[in-house]
Image (cartoon, rainbow, N blue to C red):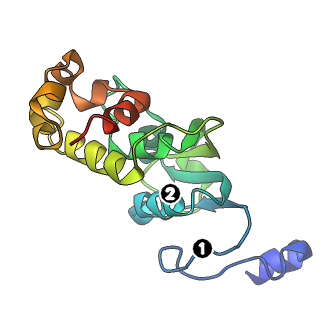
């Protein structure tokens, strides 16, 4: 931290040196999150950023490559999942570039990737965030099943008769998940 303040004096008083997972929202106004995130807690960090989504104007982060790819994955991709949908429901997500192992000393045993999150220009219309989180987590909890079988307890029989429920969770777009929240019990 001393190096940063000495090299970039304008950062004095703006660097927070504490556990990311334990801090409250660090600023009252809008802020940017930038980091080389510890790979073992990177998903937890993303969910913390989701808690602060109304204040985060940008997030740029380096993650383990597979995690970064998962965050930015689109429907129809086998790595598309809960994290992909929930992050993309609130942020435009872009995979920027790979970072080679040789960029570090000592080199890690995994590849890294850098992503950028910007708030969606047009927020998704959904019944509630709680419904979206429940639907997405339930749908992907049994991702090999059709949506009809995976989420049957969340919809009535009429809703479940829709053709969309013949698909699997990874085939639905973020928009389709948001639309389905309005049809939940």
Residue farthest along the top direction in this orientation: 163
Q: Nearer the viewer, residue 162 or 140?
A: 162
For mark 2, give the secondary structure: helix
Indicate whether 29 appears above or below 93. Answer: below
Q: Which residue is drawn at 18% across and 28% down?
A: 159
Place residue 42 in its image quadrant.
bottom left
Q: Position of residue 3 (x, y in %)?
A: 79, 78
Crowd tier of the residue under label 2, counting other residues whose Cα lies within 10 Å: few below 14, some 14–19, many 20 or above:
some
Q: Position of residue 151 (x, y in %)?
A: 16, 39
Tell me which numbered mark, 1 or 2, is placed earlier along the sequence: 1
Tell me if 175 is positioned left or right of 27 in this view.
left
Q: Where is residue 139 in the image (x, y as percent from the top left)?
A: 22, 39
Q: Please give the count of numbered marks on the rendered protein.
A: 2
For mark 1, give the secondary structure: loop
Q: Mark 1 points at which residue?
A: 25
Q: Which of 162 and 40 is in front in this view?
A: 162
Tell me if 132 is positioned left or right of 167 in this view.
right
Q: Residue 50 carries which label?
A: 2
Crowd tier of the residue under label 1, counting other residues whose Cα lies within 10 Å: few below 14, some 14–19, many 20 or above:
some
Residue farthest along the right direction in this orientation: 9
Place residue 28 in its image quadrant.
bottom right
Place residue 54 in its image quadrant.
bottom right
Tell me if 41 is positioned left or right of 81 in this view.
right
Q: How far apart are marks 1 and 2 (CA)?
A: 11 Å
Q: Which residue is drawn at 64% across and 82% down?
A: 17
Q: Which mark is residue 159?
A: none
Q: Where is residue 70 in the image (x, y as percent from the top left)?
A: 41, 40
């Amino acid at each position: 931290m001393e190096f940063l303040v000495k090299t970039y004096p304008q950062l004095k008083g703006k660097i927070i040196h504490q556990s990311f997972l334990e801090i409250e929202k660090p600023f009252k106004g809008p802020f940017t999150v930038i980091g080389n995130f510890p790979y073992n807690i990177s998903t937890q960090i993303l969910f913390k950023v989701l808690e602060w989504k109304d204040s985060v104007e940008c997030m740029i982060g380096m993650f383990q490559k597979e995690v970064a790819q998962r965050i930015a994955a689109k429907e129809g991709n086998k790595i598309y999942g809960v994290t992909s949908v929930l992050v993309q429901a609130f942020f435009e997500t872009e995979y920027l570039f790979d970072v080679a192992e040789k960029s570090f000393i000592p080199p890690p045993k995994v590849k890294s990737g850098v992503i950028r999150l910007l708030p969606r220009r047009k927020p998704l219309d959904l019944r509630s965030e709680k419904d979206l989180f429940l639907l997405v987590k339930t749908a992907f909890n049994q991702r090999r099943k059709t949506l009809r079988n995976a989420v049957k307890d969340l919809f009535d029989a009429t809703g479940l008769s829709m053709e969309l429920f013949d698909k699997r969770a990874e085939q639905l777009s973020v928009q389709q998940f948001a639309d389905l929240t309005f049809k939940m019990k």
